[in-house]
């Protein structure tokens, strides 16, 4: 797990963890859908995450929207999943970028809290192994990423793909 400080959120930390070989994603999804208050995290399917910078842009936007009380979803954590998507359709965003019953690799984001407490709590919630965020690109499904972000097959360079993803996230809510 890595922790970050955001300029918009200087008093708190953002925690991002990658879990692999997850066996209880169906249970987690069911609990999320029932608004289980113990799950105050963003649960993201790792196959659509190319780089942690992509996550940080969506997190930064979400924290900004929370600060100004303009969230489009119920809370900052669902807003993070929503903001990863280039579309403004909330249910489609959550379906495509959130976890499914068969998700094996999960990126988990927590806004606020102590890193040791967050890690300890996640280890009790997740039936899987924590892995380094540096492994993110290993689990990325480029076909899904290209489809969801509408990136043509002619774009091959990792940095160029990431720039297109980040651009889509950054301009999503520009009116």
Image (cartoon, rainbow, N blue to C red):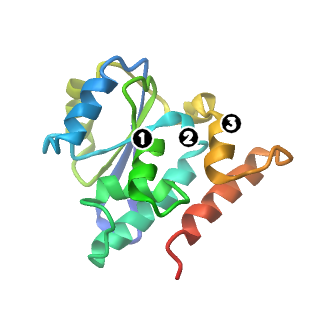
Q: Which residue is mark 1?
A: 44
Graded by Cα atoms within 10 Å as few (under 14), some (14 to 19) or many (20 or more), the crowding at tag 3 reads few
Nearer-N-terminus badge (1/3): 1
Is residue 4 at all visible to an observer of this figure? Answer: no
Query: At 30% across and 25% down in the image, what residue appears?
Result: 26
Residue in front for this viewpoint, 31 or 2: 31
Residue 45 screen position, x and y as percent: 46, 36
Q: Which residue is mark 3?
A: 143
Q: Is residue 81 above or below residue 21?
A: below
Q: Residue furthest bottom?
A: 175
Separation of disc 2 and disc 1 at Cα? Answer: 8 Å
Query: At 37% across and 72% down in the image, what residue appears?
Result: 64
Residue 109 screen position, x and y as percent: 36, 46
Graded by Cα atoms within 10 Å as few (under 14), some (14 to 19) or many (20 or more), the crowding at tag 2 reads many
Q: Is residue 143 above or below residue 130?
A: below
Q: Which residue is mark 2?
A: 48
């Amino acid at each position: 797990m890595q922790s970050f400080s955001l300029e918009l959120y200087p008093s708190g930390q953002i925690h991002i963890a990658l879990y692999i070989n997850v066996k209880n994603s169906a249970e987690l999804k069911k609990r999320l859908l029932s608004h289980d208050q113990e799950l105050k995290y963003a649960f993201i399917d790792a196959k659509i995450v190319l780089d942690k910078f992509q996550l940080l842009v969506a997190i930064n936007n979400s924290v900004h929207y929370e600060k100004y009380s303009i969230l489009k979803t119920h809370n900052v954590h669902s807003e993070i999943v929503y903001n990863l998507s280039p579309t403004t359709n909330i249910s489609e965003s959550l379906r495509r970028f959130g976890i499914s019953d068969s998700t094996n690799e999960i990126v988990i984001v927590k806004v606020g809290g102590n890193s040791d407490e967050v890690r300890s709590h996640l280890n009790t919630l997740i039936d899987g192994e924590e892995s380094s965020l540096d492994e993110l690109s290993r689990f990325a499904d480029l076909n899904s990423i290209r489809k969801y972000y509408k990136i043509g097959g002619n774009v091959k360079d990792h940095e160029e793909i990431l720039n297109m993803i980040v651009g889509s996230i950054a301009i999503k809510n520009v009116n």
